[in-house]
Amino acid sequence: MAKLAPHEVLDLEPDASLVEIKIAYRRMALAVHPDTTPGDPFAAARFREGRAAYEAMLREREERKAPPVSAVRIACVLVGPHLVGTLPVHASGAQRQRWIPLTLWAMRTCGDCEGAGSFAASSRVPFLARREECARCDGTGVVGVERRLRVRLTTLRTGTAIRLRGKGLGPGGHAFVHLAA
């Protein structure tokens, strides 16, 4: 038997309204619920199929309604191995229970020159030490680091901090995102 589309299971049009979807599901659930049809061996399967169709149609409506969320870039402070940043909720277009892409960005000390911006170059004459600019940090002593993540927001209350375990820098590092107005 060919698998039916969710709107066909509930006997609806593909662009049915939320009220029509709920009414059709309730009507179908009353007709095929295993408790109301105890002698029918296929009632449970039809009921599960109807429930899956109902949930799929609701999910499709939500996806059509919600605008796509673009990546949000957050400037962070590096505190040891932890990244700490602030997410402006109003600017992110975030909605509760939605996955949003985040880019956490911070500056850290250059590992090649250890923050000096240059290092001593070898010379044939020992007392004439020459300094060369670090190629990795271009002589600034700091480099930018980035973490790209997808985060599911379970709350949008301002002042709330979300800890993202293991998403910081180095072993044991976490990322902390503070929600701000």
Image (cartoon, rainbow, N blue to C red):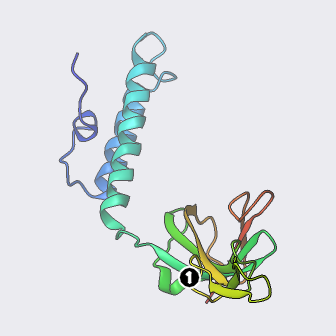
| Amino acid type at mark 1 | Val
**Image quadrant where residue 179 sits:** bottom right
- Pick whichever, 25 or 55, lies toward us: 55
Instruction: Give the x, y percent position of residue 118.
Output: 68, 85
Residue 97 drawn at (x, y percent): 55, 62
Residue that lies at the very extreme toward the left in this rendered image: 13
- Residue 88 placement (x, y as % from top left): 57, 85
Q: Residue at x 32, y 49 (%)?
A: 21
In the rendered view of the protein, which quadrant contains the C terminus?
bottom right
Q: Secondary structure at mark 1?
A: helix
Number of marks present in the image shown: 1
Front residue of 63 and 58: 63
Residue sitting nearer the eye, 171 or 148:
171
57 with respect to 107 (left or right)? left
Q: Classify 80 as above or below 138.
A: above
Q: In percent of the image, x 61 and y 75: which residue is there?
A: 156
Q: Quadrant of residue 108?
A: bottom right
Residue 129 occupies which quadrant of the picture?
bottom right
Q: Is residue 7 left or right of residue 26?
A: left
The residue shown at (82%, 73%) is 80
**Is 137 in front, or is 128?**
128
Disc 1 residue crowd, few under 14, some 14–19, many 20+, Cα 10 Å: some
Image quadrant where one finds the N terminus: top left
Residue 53 image position (x, y, % from top left): 35, 38
Q: Is residue 47 left or right of residue 60?
A: right
The residue to which callout 1 is attached is: 89
Q: Residue at the spot x=62%, y=64% of the render?
A: 154
Question: Relative to 44, does residue 177 appear above or below in the rendering?
Answer: below
Among all residues in the image, which is located at the extreme front?
A: 125
